[in-house]
Amino acid sequence: MTPHVVATNSNPVHGFSKVAASRITLLAGLGVEGDAHCGATVRHRSRVARDPTQPNLRQVHLIQAELFDDLAARGFRLEPGRIGENITTRHLDLLALPADTELLIGAIAVVRVTGLRNPCDQLNRYQPGLMAAVLDRGADGMVIRKAGVMGVVVSSGEVHSGDPIQVRLPPQPHRALEPV
């Protein structure tokens, strides 16, 4: 099954959820055109408060739709964009990708995966218990974050629902994703 885009979302103001959009435009080095998190330096309010000059490694947020399927089976009702992602995917295990993987989305847009989304308590304000539901522990006791991945835009382009996604792995040795 071909990895593809299920939904695209954006929000021009800082808020938890993103609004469904028929398409989004990715801008190289910046993020999603018109989105509150678009910029070369950090735009997430907590990170701006710490150091507004940090590079923005969280320009684009991607979540796999399979997470929503899993959460629905546990009683949570989520639609694309509700927990802040710009791009919802299907048939692509985002969490298993190594750092610096490039995703060719549609015809020309490219996103380089920078790391894992570190879930925060806003998830519980959206639906009680949701934060715990997107965290797990591996057999080794390490925390597993399931709330998607973050990336930076390498090549500009439009992204639409239904667009195919091609994966370009970085050279070996691969580095595991860490929270960004």
Image (cartoon, rainbow, N blue to C red):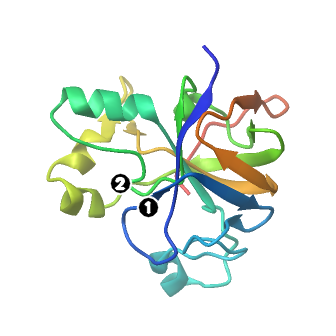
Q: Earlier in the sequence, mark 1 or mark 2?
A: 1
Foreground pick, 18 / 175: 18
Residue farthest front in this picture? 22
Q: Which residue is mark 1?
A: 18
Q: Quadrant of residue 15?
A: bottom left
Whether residue 102 sits left or right of residue 133 in the image: it is: right
Q: Residue 117 location, x and y as percent?
A: 48, 52
Q: Is residue 165 above or below residue 155?
A: above
Q: Residues within 10 Å of mark 1 (few under 14, many from 20)?
A: many
Q: Quadrant of residue 139?
A: top left
* Residue type pointed to by label 2: Arg
* Disc 1 secondary structure class: loop
Q: Residue at x 49, y 68 (%)?
A: 11
CA–CA distance between discs 1 and 2? 6 Å
Q: Are marks 1 and 2 in contact (CB under 8 Å)?
A: yes
Q: Residue at x 20, y 63 (%)?
A: 125
* Residue type pointed to by label 1: Lys
Q: Residue 113 location, x and y as percent?
A: 67, 46
Q: Residue 111 location, x and y as percent?
A: 73, 48
Q: Quadrant of residue 142?
A: top left
Q: Residue 143 location, x and y as percent?
A: 37, 40
* Disc 2 secondary structure class: loop
Q: Is residue 54 above or below residue 99?
A: below
Per the rendering, the mark at residue 94 is none
Q: Residue at x 32, y 41 (%)?
A: 135
Q: Residues within 10 Å of mark 2 (few under 14, many from 20)?
A: some
Whether residue 156 sits left or right of residue 55 in the image: it is: right
Q: Residue at x 63, y 62 (%)?
A: 59
Q: Which residue is mark 2?
A: 82
For the C terminus, the image quarter is bottom right
